[in-house]
Image (spheres, helix red, strand yellow):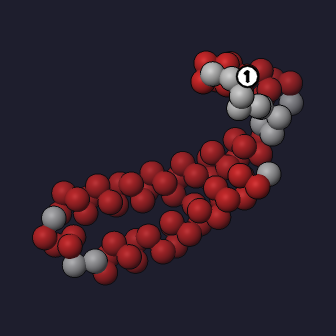
Amino acid sequence: MTLALVLLGYGVAVAAAGPAVVRRSRWVARAPRLGIAAWQSLSLAAVASPVLGGLALSVPDVRLDGTVARLLGACPAALRAQ
């Protein structure tokens, strides 16, 4: 539950403060490609963190002690069990 709240809070913070910080930065005019990459990273973080937070809320009992393949197999099984 804590992880989900942290991810949701991070998504809100990035979506609220991130664009203003990048817009005020002077380095964006000097390095436009880096500025575009920063905007894309902010967008990805703002979308992915609430999605991952919702996933953490919907599958709370998956243990992270195995391999990635076992985790990926456990997610659909846990969703079907819910």
Q: Is residue 32 left or right of residue 62?
A: left
Q: Position of residue 23 (x, y in %)?
A: 32, 76
Q: Residue at 72% of width from left, 43% of height from top?
A: 56
Residue at image position (31%, 81%) is: 24
- The residue that mark 1 highlights is 74
Tag 1: residue type?
A: Ala
Is disc 1 placed on a helix, strand or loop?
Answer: helix
Would residue 36 be found to the left or right of residue 71 on screen? left
Q: Position of residue 35 (x, y in %)?
A: 25, 63
Q: Is residue 61 above or below residue 2?
A: above
Task: Categorize mark 1 by other alpha carbons within 10 Å: few (<14), some (14-19), many (20+).
Answer: some
Residue visible at 77% across and 31% down in the picture:
62
Q: Is residue 42 above or below residue 19?
A: above
Residue 2 lies in quadrant: bottom right
Which quarter of the image is occupied by the C terminus? top right
Task: Inspect this view and state whether residue 76 appears.
Answer: no
